[in-house]
Image (spheres, rainbow, N blue to C red):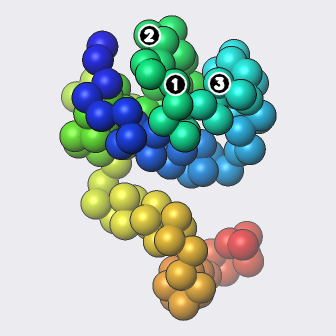
Amino acid sequence: MSIKNLTEFSSRIKLVRECSGLTREAFAKKVNVSGAYIGQLESGKKEKPSTLFLGSVEKTFNINPVWLESGDGDMNIVSDPAQGYSVLSDLEEALLRIIKEGDEAKLAAVKAVLTTFDPGGKTK
């Protein structure tokens, strides 16, 4: 598996980590590498990630291998017994973007909508 653009790859691997809500060290532990290795990948200093690392990230965080390698397609894969797998919906992708952007107004609007479907108040 070749990584077409390391700078873009570094952005993708950082996005995976940030979406998982993990620090570099915690992310590294989940995929059996060092925090320094994650830092090198995120900064683009590491020339090529190992195949073992890529497979571990894909499996551990349910990441689409095509997206991780090239940026094409959607980031996540979700199970779908009828098709073997399918990618996240447009709505899920939009929510991930809103969360990543950290726009407080958009986050508040999403929370307000979710609250209407969560009368028990479990939405945080």
Q: Earlier in the sequence, mark 1 or mark 3?
A: 3
Q: Earlier in the sequence, mark 2 or mark 3?
A: 3
The C terminus lies in which quarter of the figure? Answer: bottom right
Q: Is residue 103 left or right of residue 68?
A: right
What's under tag 3, amino acid-wise? Tyr
In three-dimensional space, the C-alpha distance between marks 2 and 3, rounded to whole angstroms, equals 14 Å
Q: Which mark is residue 119?
A: none
Q: Can residue 34 be seen in this snapshot?
A: yes
Residue pointed to by mark 2: 51
| Foreground: disc 2 or disc 3 | 3
Residue pointed to by mark 3: 37
What's under tag 2, amino acid-wise? Thr
Q: Residue drawn at (52%, 31%), measured in percent from left and top?
A: 45
Residue pointed to by mark 1: 46
Q: Residue drawn at (64%, 35%), measured in percent from left and top?
A: 39
How many marks can you see? 3
| Foreground: disc 1 or disc 2 | 1
Q: Is residue 34 left or right of residue 83?
A: right
Q: Is residue 70 left or right of residue 23?
A: left
Q: Residue drawn at (51%, 25%), measured in percent from left and top?
A: 46
In three-dimensional space, the C-alpha distance between marks 1 and 2, rounded to whole angstroms, equals 13 Å
